[in-house]
Image (tube, grey):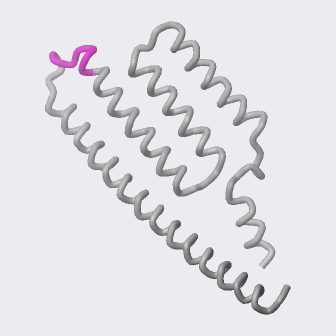
Amino acid sequence: MSPKRQVNHNIRKHFNGIIYNISRYVEIALSIVILVVIVLAGVRLVMEIAGTSVSSMDTEFFTSFLSQALSLVVGVEFVKMLCQHSAQTVVEVLMFATARQMVVEHLGPVETLIGVLSIAVLFAIRKYLMTDNDDMNSRKHKEESEH
């Protein structure tokens, strides 16, 4: 490689590193914002429950509560996915989101069957196809251990 190409390659590599670091910090900042919103929504949910009399807690109230609570769970799993960057967390987010949709939306028989099959496929993927080497950070861990 000519010296000029080597310099261009080094500059491009340096800027790629800077851009990657900036994107990681932005991702962490967004994770913190999402987590704050989840905590505030959780507090609001608890206050709503505390302010509701037992006699007015009917099935509609329970469905609304379950929808909000499961949305918070999906949000927490999403934040974990942003922080961990592993295939495992991606599969977990998909499982929770599918389960939430099935429970809250009261789907028809065909949609319920598709949801159950989707969750079964995700469990099978997690159990049989995923290993520790499937983590998206495995290359990063290997590089760190080599230094």
Residue at the (29%, 27%) spot, across then down: 65
Residue at the (76%, 85%) spot, across then down: 5
The answer to whether 29 is drawn above or below residue 103 in the figure is below
What is the x, y in percent for residue 26? Answer: 45, 66
Q: Quadrant of residue 138?
A: bottom right
Q: Is residue 16 left or right of residue 79?
A: right
The answer to whether 120 is drawn above or below residue 75 in the figure is above
Q: Is residue 91 left or right of residue 55?
A: right
Q: Is residue 86 left or right of residue 65?
A: right
Residue 36 covered by magenta stretch? no
The answer to whether 115 is drawn above or below residue 126 in the figure is above
Q: Quadrant for the C terminus, please.
A: bottom right
Q: Is residue 66 left or right of residue 22?
A: left
What is the x, y in percent for residue 82? Answer: 52, 54
User: Magenta residues: mostly which secondary structure?
Assistant: helix
What is the x, y in percent for residue 56? Answer: 16, 18
Q: Quadrant of residue 4?
A: bottom right
Looking at the rendering, the stretch of residues picked out in magenta corresponds to 55-61
The answer to whether 109 is drawn above or below residue 33 in the figure is above
Residue farthest to the bottom, as pictured:
3
Residue at the (70%, 85%) spot, across then down: 8
What is the x, y in percent for residue 63? Answer: 31, 21
Q: Quadrant for the N terminus, please.
A: bottom right
